[in-house]
Amino acid sequence: MKDKLKIGITCYPTVGGSGVIATELGKMLAENGHEIHFISSSLPFRLNKMYHNIFYHQVEVNQYSVFQYAPYDIALASKMAEVIKREKLDLLHVHYAVPHAICAILAKQMSGREVKIVTTLHGTDITVLGYDSSLTDAIKFGIEQSDAVTAVSNALITQTYDLIKPDKTILPVYNFIDERVYNKKDSSYLKKEFGIGEDEKVVIHVSNFRGVKRVPDVVRAFGHISSKTDARLLLVGDGPLMNEVSKLVDDLSLSGRVLFLGKQDNVEELYSISDLMLLLSEKESFGLVALEAMACGVPCIGTNIGGIPEVISDGRNGFICQLGDIEGIAEKALELLTDEALHRSFSRASLATVSNSFSAEKIVSQYEEIYNQLLSGE
Ligand code: GMT
């Protein structure tokens, strides 16, 4: 068994958490000496540094007039097969059961090589597509034909068995964080630049503003919070809910209190000026943004949904509230924002949770163990 592997990684490079995890995993594996080949439609957005052992193979999807739809899946499978053969890949690690696991299975057959396939489920592929019965069989096939399948939380594993019923063991491998990037920075100057008073509390929400993120709940809860204490809300991200949210901010007369920051890189600097993160989603298989905030010492309040309670421990490093319980959420937020000792203890516990359970070193070695087991035929 080789200890340095040649690994192909496929994800949707521009899609939120799954793209982030796939890219960060590739970077960490490269740092451990493996040779990494990203095979995707555009350069992963977090691949912002030169690595001698990371290669990028672009999938070009052309629109031909004879086809009604651009053939992304076929183009990807062909590119995967080409890279498997030319680079003699040991394994493909794909993120999402559909379409990526299916493409990998096809590519393996096209290449005629015994490449192993590892599929990671992130939630969006199961919760959204699992309810679309026209795709259930395809998802099941992608899962069952992969050599190993992981999911980012136990809640997602349960949900996958409920919805898809695959005859396959799914291993839990949590998401991780690079603590070298996500840690508390001195960005107090930012508070000044945003015009936020030193004593004002800062509440943050980061998402892609899809309906499932329930950003209006964040605004409503913040409305209660700011009626009782001096606070500002940072809304980071953009997406379909933006118009509704900005109208709600006006309707609740919160315009002076809410800062719309749009999509941002370097969010660790924003977490570093924040006192509390709100993640009030109605679907969330993990909640990577909560982990990012916690790595910067910011306690979180999350909903009792999906994998969120596997990241936030109620009453220890944050609070878990009922979905849509705006008053309950605001009450817990005020407790945390006004009790310095409680905040300090939750902030320390958040840091400890990150290093004990979600460090890059720990989680990346779990993936390496899965690769090694597959390749040694155990
Ligand atoms: O949440 C999104 O809209 C993006 C989505 C994705 O597919 O990238 O995120 C999913 O994967 C992340 C990384 O594993 C998880 O942290 C998110 O919880 C999960 N989103 C949902 O389950 C809705």
Image (cartoon, helix red, strand yellow):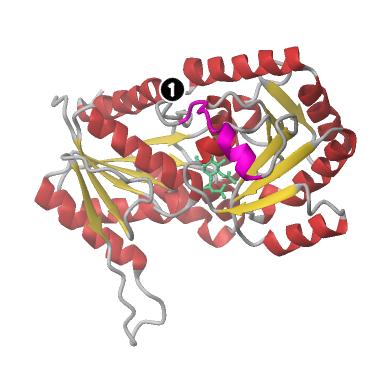
At 75% from the left and 44% from the top, the residue drawn is 218
At 35% from the left and 71% from the top, the residue drawn is 71
Q: Which residue lies under the disc numbered 1?
A: 359
Residue range of the region highlighted in magenta in the rendering: 182-194
Residue 187: x, y in percent? 54, 33
Image height check: is 190 above or below 132? above
Q: Along the horizontal axis of the image, is 139 left or right of 58?
A: right
When asked about the image quadrant of residue 297, the answer is top right
Q: Can residue 287 be seen in this view?
A: no
The quadrant of the rendering that contains the N terminus is: top left
Q: Can residue 372 be seen in this view?
A: yes
Image height check: is 197 above or below 83? above
Of residues 96 and 190, the one nearer the viewer is 190
Of residues 243 and 154, the one nearer the viewer is 243
Judged from the image, the secondary structure of the residue bearing numbered disc 1 is loop
Residue 130: x, y in percent? 57, 51
Residue 192 belongs to magenta span: yes
Q: Along the horizontal axis of the image, is 372 left or right of 289?
A: left
Q: Residues within 10 Å of mark 1 (few under 14, many from 20)?
A: some
Q: Along the horizontal axis of the image, is 298 left or right of 14?
A: right
Image height check: is 118 above or below 1? below
Of residues 315 and 247, the one nearer the viewer is 247
Residue 106 belongs to magenta span: no
Of residues 278 and 92, the one nearer the viewer is 278
